[in-house]
């Protein structure tokens, strides 16, 4: 069997060696998952909730170990990694709260001599492919909904953050409810194309998502795809500039910009454009790059050093067309880690790659606009549609903005946050389906119509 390694992006050291599963081991895992499903689906929702809440104690009891694993494997500052555990608990607990009501059969208006209702049947074995950038949160949304709905889970975590997959198995893996699997891309494709699974949840690239969608369609079952974004923000003339700058800089720089719903482009009304830039610059220049275990570090290394090349290419193209870098703009080596300086750049064209292509890094391109309509047009001029933001003190303006932008989530005076009560969904190349909220739970089920004629 071939092996893979998790590597510390700051030190360059190998953390752990993992053996990839053979075809026979994959088959064994699916058999175990199928067997567990036949029992778990019979457990009442109330009992599922109780068992899952009990399993959450694992994350409370192992907070520091898990946080250090996140930091060592993908480079996020330790203080920020600790916060991801709180996010996981929030999502699980909210879905546990609503599951009994949401998953209860839907009643239908009474009809004489008939009993009718709509049951929410679990899919069966759910295959979850989780990304590395928020290794707990991305996996948690799918796992929580799948288990509560009565499914069992095969979890394939990114090869950068394999220990997190192992933590999920330790927490929920009793009786085969969640199994951590280490697979090659080829084995993953075979499992989706031919394996005994019934649903796929994937977070990752557009290209990989398209392949998964094609494979599941051939087998007549569905998938949930979250494929990234190029999230745009608009700073309206009535916005609080200090608050807006702080919000959007953090939304662009947090986690070294390695976030699907991070802020990747900002359109600022001409009346407040200069003030916004002046306010952003010191915020961006205040980041401290270094060892992610150092409590003073506010930005860690890139998990994927190669992404620095893409950012440099985007910046070079923009500068060649007249853009101006106000702060940052360069990659930097510290120890064995590749960092990218938090960067503020002003641009004058929306068709640049820095405004159109996801970069997964700490870049904040800013463009001046003349009004709401122009900002909305620029935000919609994208292959992606995950989230959008308007900074304004006028709810009527925000409502009009929300009605016109083509994104799954619209924020007013907030960004880069998943509320578990709201569906997490995208349009266009940002994906399909929903996670979180009642819609995330229902996505882990299929409707079954009960149509009983009670007497002949």
Image: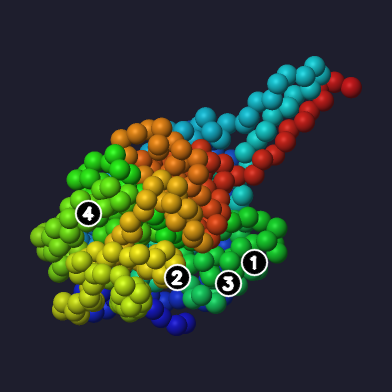
Residue 274 is tagged as 4
Q: Nearer the viewer, residue 204 or 194?
A: 204
- Circle nearer the viewer, 3 or 1: 1
The answer to the question of whether label 3 and label 1 lie on touching residues, with beta carbons closer than 8 A, is: yes
Mark 3 / mark 4, whichever is N-terminal: 3
**Residue 70 shows up from this direction:** no
Left or right: 13 with respect to 205?
left
**Residue 104 shows up from this direction:** yes
Decide: is 81 above or below 146. below
Residue at screen point 33% across, 56% down: 368
Residue 206 percent coordinates (x, y): 51, 66
Residue 37 is tagged as none
The answer to the question of whether label 2 and label 1 lie on touching residues, with beta carbons closer than 8 A, is: no
Residue at screen point 57% across, 46% down: 443
Mark 1 / mark 4, whichever is N-terminal: 1
Residue 182 is tagged as 2
Residue 189 is tagged as 3
Mark 2 / mark 1, whichever is N-terminal: 2
């Amino acid at each position: 069997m071939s092996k893979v390694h998790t590597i510390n992006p700051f030190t360059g050291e190998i953390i752990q060696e993992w053996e990839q599963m053979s075809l026979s081991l994959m088959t064994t895992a699916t058999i175990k998952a199928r067997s567990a499903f036949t029992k778990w689906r019979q457990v009442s929702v109330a009992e599922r909730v109780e068992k899952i809440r009990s399993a959450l104690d694992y994350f409370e009891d192992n907070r520091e170990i898990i946080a250090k694993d996140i930091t060592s494997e993908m480079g996020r500052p330790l203080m920020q990694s600790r916060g991801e555990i709180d996010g996981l608990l929030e999502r699980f607990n909210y879905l546990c709260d609503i599951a009994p009501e949401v998953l209860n059969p839907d009643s239908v208006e009474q009809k004489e001599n008939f009993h009718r209702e709509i049951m929410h049947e679990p899919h069966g074995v759910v295959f979850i492919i989780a990304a590395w950038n928020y290794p707990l949160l991305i996996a948690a949304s799918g796992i929580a909904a799948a288990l509560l709905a009565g499914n069992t889970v095969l979890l394939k975590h990114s090869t950068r953050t394999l220990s997190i997959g192992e933590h999920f198995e330790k927490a929920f893996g009793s009786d085969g409810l969640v199994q951590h699997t280490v697979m090659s891309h080829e084995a993953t494709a075979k499992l989706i194309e031919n394996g005994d699974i019934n649903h796929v949840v994937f977070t990752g690239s557009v290209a990989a998502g398209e392949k998964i969608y094609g494979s599941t369609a051939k087998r007549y079952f569905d998938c949930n795809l979250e494929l990234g974004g190029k999230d745009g923000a608009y700073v309206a003339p009535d916005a609080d500039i200090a608050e807006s700058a702080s919000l959007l800089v953090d939304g662009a720089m947090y986690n070294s910009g390695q976030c699907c719903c991070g802020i990747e482009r900002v359109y600022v009304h001409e009346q407040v454009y200069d003030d916004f830039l002046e306010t952003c610059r010191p915020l961006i220049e205040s980041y401290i790059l270094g060892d992610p275990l150092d409590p003073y570090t506010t930005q860690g290394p890139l998990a994927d050093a190669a992404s620095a090349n893409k950012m440099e290419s985007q910046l070079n193209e923009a500068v060649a067309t007249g853009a101006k870098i106000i702060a940052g703009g360069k990659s930097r080596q510290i120890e064995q880690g590749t960092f990218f300086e938090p960067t503020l750049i002003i641009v004058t064209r929306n068709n640049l790659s820095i405004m159109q292509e996801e970069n997964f890094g700490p870049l904040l391109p800013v463009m001046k606009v003349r009004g709401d309509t122009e900002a909305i047009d620029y935000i919609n001029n994208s292959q992606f549609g995950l989230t959008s933001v308007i900074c304004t003190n006028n709810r009527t303006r925000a409502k009009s903005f929300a009605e016109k932008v083509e994104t799954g989530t619209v924020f007013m005076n907030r960004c880069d946050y998943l509320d578990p009560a709201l569906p997490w969904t995208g349009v266009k190349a940002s994906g399909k389906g929903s996670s979180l909220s009642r819609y995330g739970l229902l996505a882990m089920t299929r409707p079954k119509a009960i149509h009983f004629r009670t007497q002949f």
